Image (tube, rainbow, N blue to C red):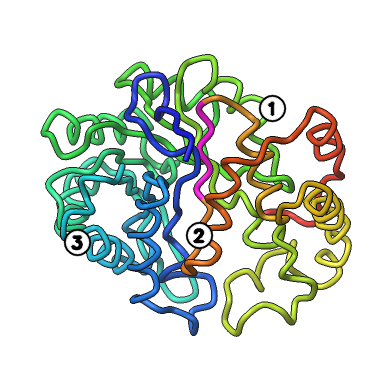
Amino acid sequence: MRTTTLGANGPEVGVVGLGCMGMTWAYDPAGRNDEASVEVLRTALDLGVTLIDTADIYGPYDNEELVGRGLAGGYRERAVLATKVGLVPGGEGVRAVNNGRPEHVRAAIDASLRRLGVEYVDLYQLHRVDPQVPVEETWGALAEAVRAGKARAIGLSEVTVEQIERAQAVHPVASVQSELSLWTRDALAEVVPYTERHGIAFLPFSPLGRGFLTGSITSAADLPADDWRSTLPRFQEEALQANLVIVAKVREIAERLGATPAQVALAWVLAQGRYVVPIPGTKTPKYLVENAGSAELVLSAADLAELDALPAPVGGRY
């Protein structure tokens, strides 16, 4: 696989990474298969998909344990391992709440390292800024993890340019993770250009529109039972049907290029910047290979223009 670096000063990574959330959390809970997920993790490294992204809240907690299991036995040294802190389980009916208190960060990194079975992570990320805690205070606690050798670098997720600048004043920001896909382009207005100018990696999560851009979901009835996506506005039947026009154009270009819709959608994301490293999630070896293949797909200027002209989606992200 083609490689880039995790920002201007980071380690070398494959241009496509692997998001691990769906292996244990949110998507198709009845379809969980830990053995298949371990195979996906190890096959990813064989394919050059070296950036492996998890978080303590996924599960909660058991996603890190699963990733640690997949990377055991010599695989850890081949991975650029990333996890996150800053969200904790909520109460009844609440998936997660913010916790950016420094004391929580200090305890959470140790717990993550134990679950992962590693001595350090390559990238430790603030999952969300806690509105009750100044970002400088939370970021300072993450910086302590770097000084203690528990993390090689630290990053942010779902932040504004102002928040990046405030964090930068305390400790270098290695990466910013936010949603980016053909149906979620908000980050292209300010955040992606800022990260590109400053040599910061940008890690798009949900680059396949939570699976929608693959063309495999044509009705709300296609979602598995208890799948979290069924609660999201864009996956309600009326909005979903309106959004199929986006998928139709992606499929048209894919057929023209002899690729899959997923590969076209990922290739578009890859074209958004030198340090843009999408982290599509999958727990299926077949789709892992398909996603990795997007690294070799080059979209022409005309292809990109067609995709850039796609309409905005109907429905909010959450």
User: In the image, 51: left or right of 191?
Assistant: left
- Look at the image and give the residue range highlighted in magenta: 275-279
Residue placed under numbered mark 1 in the picture: 189
Q: Residues within 10 Å of mark 1 (few under 14, many from 20)?
A: few
Q: Position of residue 296 (x, y in %)?
A: 59, 40
Q: Earlier in the sequence, mark 1 or mark 3?
A: 3
Q: Is residue 224 above or below residue 245?
A: below
Q: Earlier in the sequence, mark 1 or mark 2?
A: 1
- Residue type beneath disc 2: Leu
Q: Position of residue 78 (x, y in %)?
A: 26, 45
Of marks 2 and 3, the one in the foreground: 2
The residue at the point 36 percent across, 54 percent down is 54
Residue placed under numbered mark 3 in the picture: 115
Residue placed under numbered mark 2 in the picture: 288
- Residue type beneath disc 1: Ala
- Residue type beneath disc 3: Arg
Q: Earlier in the sequence, mark 2 or mark 3?
A: 3
Q: Residue furthest front?
A: 258
Q: Position of residue 197 (x, y in %)?
A: 54, 14
Element marked by disc 2? helix
User: In the image, 173: left or right of 111?
Assistant: right
The residue at the point 50 percent across, 27 percent down is 275
**What's the CA distance linking mark 1 and mark 3?**
37 Å
The residue at the point 40 percent across, 79 percent down is 33
Q: Quadrant of the C terminus?
A: bottom right
Q: Position of residue 192 (x, y in %)?
A: 59, 27
**What's the CA distance linking mark 2 and mark 3?**
24 Å
Q: Residues within 10 Å of mark 3 (few under 14, many from 20)?
A: some
Q: Residues within 10 Å of mark 2 (few under 14, many from 20)?
A: many
Tell me, yes or no, whether the highlighted magenta stretch contains residue 106: no
Of marks 1 and 2, the one in the foreground: 2
In the foreground, 290 or 201: 290
